[in-house]
């Protein structure tokens, strides 16, 4: 009896003490939080978030570069260039040529891009050596006129290049780097990059562009275009007569009209088109 009394005074029987120990253990387990999974930890979540943001930024930079724009290292080189043996600013050929072919064009226009890269190059190759045809490019602010200035800025930069008699190489580079309409693709970085590529005096180019005089030239061209009238780009005018076409005309189609104009001027038709001439892509003219 003395042992039983002693056990009771010190905390009960052994069984009671074991039950109490188990109860205390369960209470401690309930009170202690389970370890948090790694994927739920704040550090892990912050790291994943930072990686996602970095991926988005990298993707944006890559897409921006693919659209055109950027420094000279990202400037796309044209696959072909307009012959410039008889170039003088935005014209090619003698001022007194019996036939003048005017191109009213917008550097943002996809149809103008197709015309410049195929039809125009073939026509200049064919007729420039004859001295009978003069080609004149009029850069106009047709797309986004009065609102978005991408066409205005691209045209002004080309006109500034023309002051150094490099209008046509600049013209070809702009089309090679054409981006989406009114997307901001003709950045100053791109315009300067093209100027560097073709070897312009950058001090003179910057002074011309920043001075704003050639932006005025593009605006004046645009005002004259309304009198032609230019209803879509590109609009081709041969000795004052617009060539009507729903699609980008081919070199053969324009050649036929040039030969008619030469005959009417008593200058005779040109030699047959070379076999290398290729039709322009059947892209619809810009509205």
Image (cartoon, rainbow, N blue to C red):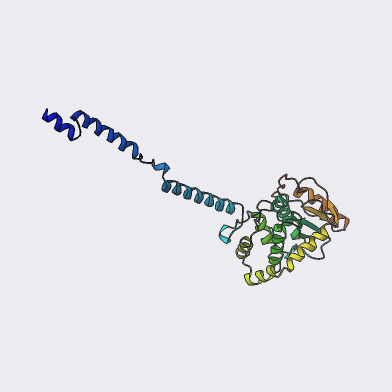
Q: Is residue 84 left or right of residue 246?
A: left
State the residue at coordinates (79%, 45%). 246
The residue lying toward the viewer, choosing from 257 and 188, is 188
Report the front residue among 203 and 236.
203
| Position in image of residue 276 (x %, y %) | 69, 50
Q: Is residue 261 above or below residue 27?
A: below
Quadrant of res 192: bottom right
Name the side, left or right, on which 67 lies relative to 220: left
Q: Position of residue 178 (x, y in %)?
A: 66, 54
| Residue 56 appearing in the image | yes
Check the picture and name the quadrant holding the N terminus.
top left
Q: Is residue 277 above or below residue 167?
A: above
Q: Quadrant of residue 187?
A: bottom right
**Residue 46 at x, y percent in the picture:** 45, 49
Residue at 80% over, 57% down: 101
Q: Is residue 114 above or below residue 224?
A: above
**Residue 164 visible in the picture:** no
38 and 125: which is toward the camera? 38
Residue in view at x 34 percent, y 36 percent: 30
């Amino acid at each position: 009896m003395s042992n039983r009394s002693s056990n009771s005074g010190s905390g009960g029987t052994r069984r009671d003490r074991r039950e109490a120990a188990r109860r205390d253990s369960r209470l401690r387990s309930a009170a202690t939080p389970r370890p948090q999974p790694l994927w739920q930890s704040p550090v892990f979540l912050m790291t994943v978030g930072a990686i996602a943001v970095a991926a988005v930024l990298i993707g944006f930079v890559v897409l921006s570069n693919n659209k055109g724009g950027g420094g000279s290292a990202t400037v796309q080189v044209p696959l072909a260039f307009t012959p410039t043996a008889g170039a003088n600013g935005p014209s090619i050929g003698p001022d007194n040529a019996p036939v003048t072919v005017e191109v009213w064009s917008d550097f943002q226009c996809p149809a103008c891009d197709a015309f410049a890269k195929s039809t125009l190059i073939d026509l200049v190759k064919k007729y420039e050596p004859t001295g009978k045809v003069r080609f004149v490019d009029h850069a106009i602010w047709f797309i986004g006129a009065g609102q978005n200035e991408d066409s205005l800025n691209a045209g002004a930069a080309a006109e500034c290049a023309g002051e150094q008699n490099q209008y046509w190489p600049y013209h070809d580079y702009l089309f090679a780097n054409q981006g989406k309409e009114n997307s901001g693709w003709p950045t100053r970085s791109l315009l300067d990059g093209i100027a560097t590529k073709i070897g312009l005096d950058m001090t003179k180019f910057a002074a011309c562009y920043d001075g704003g005089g050639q932006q005025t030239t593009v605006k004046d061209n645009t005002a004259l275009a309304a009198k032609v009238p230019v209803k879509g780009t590109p609009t081709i005018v041969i000795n004052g007569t617009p060539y009507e076409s729903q699609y980008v005309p081919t070199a053969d189609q324009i050649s036929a009209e040039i030969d008619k104009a030469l005959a009417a001027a008593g200058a005779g038709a040109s030699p047959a088109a070379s076999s290398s001439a290729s039709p322009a892509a059947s892209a619809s003219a810009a509205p």
